[in-house]
Image (cartoon, grey):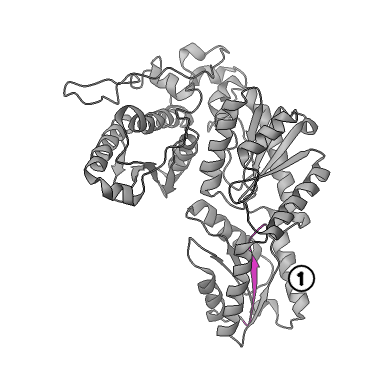
Amino acid sequence: MNPERSALLLVGHGTADPAGQAEYERLAALLSDRLMTFVQPCFLELADPPIAQAIDECVTAGFQHIVALPLLLGAASHQKNDIPTALNLARARWPEVSIYYGTPLGAQYTLVCTLAERVDLARAAANTQIPPEETALAIIGRGSRDPDSNAEVARIARLLWEGRGYGWVEYGFYGLSQPDTAVTLDRCVALGAKQVVVLPYLLFTGRIHQRIGILVEAAQQRHREIAFLLAEHLGEHPGVIAAIRQRYEEALNDTATMNCDVCKYRQLMPGFTAEFGLPQTSDHHHGMRGVSHHHGAPAANRILPPRYRGGVAVSAAPMGAAPLVYDAEGRVAWDQIWGGDDPNSPFCELALAGGPPHRGELLEPASPDTVAADPEAYARVVAELVRGLRLVTSLTVVTDRAPGWVGLVCTSEEMALWLLRAIVVENISVRRERNVLFLPAGPNFHLESEIKNVITAVAKTHHYWQEHMQGGQP
């Protein structure tokens, strides 16, 4: 793909703060000059345009290739759920346009260097005489309910600590997670630091940035004998531009694999093959390291169902909905709908060539209040989900963690993470806690729609993981 003929979609959180909005627009202009390509900002909330409108504007302007880059520092639920859903809807609306999905910025080396420079500037501005070994650095992230996103803050804190001579590097969060900002700053003092440099791990200014400043002032009042310095946020630093450019170039390089027939399943979720925060590259082996199968090579014949061997293209058209099958007791026989593990059956075909998402709108969990309002109906829905999930996966299912969610206990965190990435592109909400994958439930779920949607998506993706990603024979 020629980068000069592609559009870069910068997807940010969004802010109602004019200064933060201005920073975002200046950064987009700088990127357009550096990359020599069209850059379109868009936002998840609080600012315009939204993702759908931005894509429409790019297509109207004549761009046939769009790289959507999540301008996020970690792999939060926005990156896993909201953005893919919007992109899938845009693909359905503009089937002739190629829309690729990049990875979030993550803990890149250029961002580590940017933070280190922010520390040096803060210390120089204060004309401090306190040595680095008596200085603590406190990195404060936005905070998320997603552990992957929070882990990125911990990771960059560790990378910043290594080899720079500071006594301590702690991390905390503004909200939604622990330790919070006040606890983090108090901990730096308790560890013996005589100076604390606070680093807002934020791309742009705004409400969170301003309130972190207020919390730093409060810490200074609590510990008057300690010097608290507030460093600048990341902003329009050249290191930020370099980090975005790297993710953009990785996405461009990764699009070459999108034409391989073996990768049609992956086409449903571009950008999800790489680990969050790591370069978006692929050895193009789908987990079968060292086995070449590019464009119909012999290894592809070993993994594909017979009808797709020999270079036959996998259709991207949606499969017809499989009818419900009932057992002798009148219950849905979820394990028989797609024919079990027979490689010639629709089950394997469902896994490999299932086409577009099974839902047009995002299926979300019911709220705790909705669950409490009709506990009997909710119990019936959960019981059917548990039965169906067990039949199609043979995995343990838990129901006592949180109202509105049913937990599928995977055999590993790797499996749970892979399934999460695959299921989310089916327009079904999903979250993960270690190796437990949580799927939505609600008292208003119906057997032939919402319940079937959840079980179908799990059956499809679990089969693909078990029989193909793990290198099993179909």
| Quarter of image, res 289 | top right
Residue 113 x %, y %:
72, 60
Image quarter (top left, top right, bottom left or bottom right) of the N terminus: top right
Residue drawn 71% across the image and 50% down it: 243
Residue 21 x %, y %:
70, 54
Image quarter (top left, top right, bottom left or bottom right) of the C terminus: top left
Residue drawn 50% across the image and 22% down it: 355
Secondary structure mostly taken by the magenta-highlighted segment of the chain: strand
* Residues shaded magenta: 194-203
| Quarter of image, res 410 | top left
* 367 over 360 or under it: above or below: below
Residue drawn 27% across the image and 37% down it: 381
Tag 1: amino acid? Leu
- Residue 207 is left or right of residue 439, and the answer is right
* 88 over 441 or under it: above or below: above
Quick one: SS at disc 1? helix
* Residue for badge 1: 121
Residue 199 x %, y %:
65, 67
| Quarter of image, res 366 | top left
